[in-house]
Image (cartoon, helix red, strand yellow):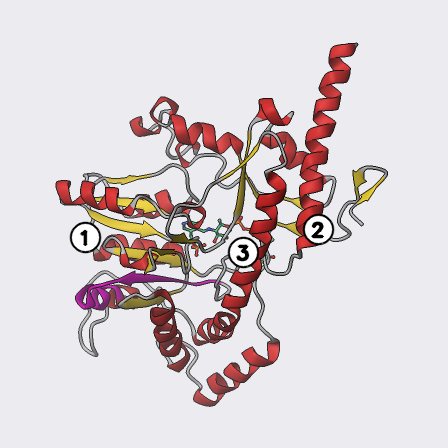
């Protein structure tokens, strides 16, 4: 039952935008037993090598290097490609994207760092054309795009390097983790050296590296999580189909259309709220849903260009960013993870509708006074 007297009943327990996919504890323990036997806890052990191979296969990429997290992977990609100048990027992303560039002291145009936001692919053909014309490297931030495919081609095969995040909030995760994928074995070797302090063989340190290695414990968890990803994805697809049906009935709520020929990672369920048609703003909806124990997220508000550390850049002026500036006021990520049922989705949609109805009634009452 989702409604009592026309008002949706709040969830008993908080419902969040996402929940991590948890494999059975016994499956993880069995892998950990192997780690205990081997007594190798990190520095590229057997679990690490197994996960790297399994993910190369799963993502359909030639080369893959695991990392402690996506941000360190991104910083390493920038260094491995020798990007030293300005890099073109988007303000509509998580802080990690522009911060990775700032940590790398970028000042001259030498690359593009594009983000497959919410797992929806960028215009990879158009960007490659621009990059080729101006001899720029392309790094893709595919933090949200695990397993996304374009015309059956893995998302990690476009551009020069692609970063994946394996944070707990991602479709596939290792609690904390990430990876870089590329098509060039020499670049992979450079990435691996940079990931390990720049050490190249027993007696040589050939680059200013960092420590980005994934531990055996994280890799073991990842191997178990990977076994459940197909079922998780199938359930997310069912939930998205239900959301789509229900949101089609709601005036003022639009759905980001998937691109033709794209299999999505189903990382987030994103709606866009048109205040005039819906009855209240995205922010009011976000606040109103909390009363139902429902915690949506405004990814990625505020725009990176509005952070104190970036707002004085000439490129950060809102007039330069009309699309992102508008979108960031209107988008809302609603819960999407395999642990939800279609009945939960119905309740969530009833709650969204109820907040809109309530707002329209308040406006009408105010006008009548
Ligand atoms: N590029 C892009 C475009 C990114 O979105 C990200 C990360 C990166 C780069 C960097 O990758 P990493 O260095 O992180 O690998 C989360 C994640 O921490 C972050 O990884 C992610 N993007 C971002 C979009 O989301 P928050 O601040 O929203 O996380 P938090 O803790 O509020 O979690 C959201 C919800 O998930 C919670 O309300 C409850 C649920 N949750 C979360 C965790 C951590 C759980 O149920 N269990 C958990 O263990 O940033």
Judge the density around disc 1: few (<14), some (14-19), many (≥20) Cα neighbours within 10 Å: few
Q: Which residue is denoted by mark 3 in the rendering?
A: 237
The residue segment tinted magenta is 176-191
Counting residues from the N terminus, which is met first, the one under dot 2 or under dot 1? 2
Quarter of the image where one finds residue 208 = bottom left
Extreme-right residue of the structure = 5
Q: Is mark 3 within 8 Å of ligand 1?
A: no
Quarter of the image where one finds residue 123 = top left
Report the side of 275 relative to 163 (left or right). Answer: right
How far is disc 2 from disc 1 in space, using C-alphas? 45 Å
How far is disc 3 from disc 2 in space, using C-alphas? 22 Å
Is residue 183 covered in magenta? yes
Where residue 182 appears, as percent x and y from the top left, is 26, 61
Counting residues from the N terminus, which is met first, the one under dot 3 or under dot 1? 1
Disc 2 on helix, strand or loop?
loop
In the picture, the disc for residue 141 is none
Where residue 59 appears, as percent x and y from the top left, is 36, 65
In the picture, the disc for residue 14 is 2
């Amino acid at each position: 039952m989702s409604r009592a007297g026309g008002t949706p009943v709040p969830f008993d327990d908080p419902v969040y935008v996402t929940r991590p996919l948890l494999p059975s504890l016994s499956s993880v323990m069995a892998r950990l037993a192997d780690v205990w036997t081997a007594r190798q806890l990190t520095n590229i052990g057997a679990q690490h090598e197994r996960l790297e191979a399994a993910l190369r296969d799963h993502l359909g990429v030639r080369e893959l290097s695991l990392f402690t997290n996506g941000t360190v992977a991104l910083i390493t990609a920038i260094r491995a490609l020798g990007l030293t100048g300005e890099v073109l990027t988007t303000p509509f992303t998580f802080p990690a994207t522009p911060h990775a560039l700032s940590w790398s002291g970028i000042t001259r145009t030498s690359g593009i760092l594009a983000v497959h936001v919410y797992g929806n692919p960028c215009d990879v053909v158009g960007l490659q054309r621009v990059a080729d014309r101006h001899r720029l490297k392309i790094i893709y931030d595919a933090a949200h795009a695990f397993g996304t495919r374009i015309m059956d081609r893995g998302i990690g095969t476009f551009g020069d390097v692609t970063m994946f995040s394996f944070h707990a909030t991602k479709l596939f995760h290792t609690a904390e983790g990430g990876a870089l994928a590329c098509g060039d074995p020499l670049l992979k070797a450079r990435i691996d050296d940079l990931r390990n302090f720049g050490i190249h063989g027993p007696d040589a340190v050939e680059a200013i590296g960092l420590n980005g290695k994934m531990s055996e414990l994280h890799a073991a968890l990842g191997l178990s999580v990977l076994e459940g990803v197909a079922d998780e994805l199938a359930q997310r697809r069912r939930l998205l189909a239900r959301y789509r049906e229900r949101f089609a009935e709601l005036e003022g709520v639009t759905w980001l259309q998937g691109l033709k020929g794209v299999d999505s990672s189903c990382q987030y369920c994103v709606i866009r709220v048109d205040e005039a048609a819906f009855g209240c703003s995205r922010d009011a909806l976000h606040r109103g849903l909390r009363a139902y124990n429902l915690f949506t997220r405004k990814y990625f508000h505020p725009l990176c260009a509005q952070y104190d550390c970036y707002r004085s850049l000439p490129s950060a002026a809102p007039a330069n960013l009309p699309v992102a500036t508008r979108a960031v006021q209107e988008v809302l990520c609603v819960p999407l993870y395999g642990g939800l049922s279609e009945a939960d989705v119905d309740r969530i949609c009833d709650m969204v509708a109820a907040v809109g109805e309530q707002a329209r009634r308040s406006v009408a009452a105010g006008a009548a006074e």
